Amino acid sequence: QVLLVESGGGVVQPGGSLRISCAAPRTIFSVFTQKIMGWYRQAPGKQRELVATVTSSGSTNYADSVKGRFTISRDNSRKKIYLQMNSLKDEDTAVYYCNALDELTMSSDWGQGTQVTVGS
């Protein structure tokens, strides 16, 4: 099981930017690099949805709703991933969860979530 710890959430005005991070402090490097890492979000009353994923080699995938505004990245040496969020909208308000997916076993681990609130 991979421990994932998110940080960096907060309140931001519409049009603003925020960067959230996710660390896997207890995971060894070789295990971390086997994971497809991703960000998901869940707004009140809605299902959890994919935001973006990044493979160990850096290939990325984004939800249509965030393309061109959000950028996912990972630093394997630090066992961290990031989500840079620009041009934030009210509808981006949600709890953002970090996810680690093992492609071979299809096992999935989740962080505790970090709240992002967009509003004036």
Image: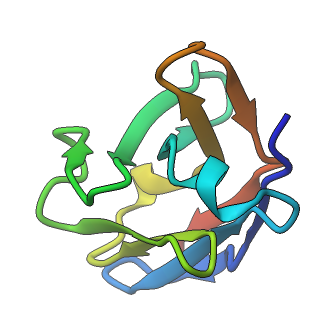
Q: Residue furthest front?
A: 30
Q: Is residue 24 visible?
A: yes
- Residue 77's x, y, as percent? 55, 79
- Residue at 54% from the left image edge and 82% from the top image edge: 12
- Residue at 51% from the left image edge and 71% from the top image edge: 76
- Residue at 38% from the left image edge and 54% from the top image edge: 56
Left or right, 115 with reference to 54: right
When asked about the image quadrant of residue 6, the answer is: bottom right
Q: Residue furthest top?
A: 105
Q: Nearer the viewer, residue 119 or 12?
A: 12
Left or right, 85 with reference to 76: left
Left or right, 68 with reference to 98: left
Quarter of the figure with the N terminus:
top right
- Residue 65's x, y, as percent? 22, 43
Relative to residue 56, is residue 19 depicted above or below? below
Q: Residue furthest left?
A: 68
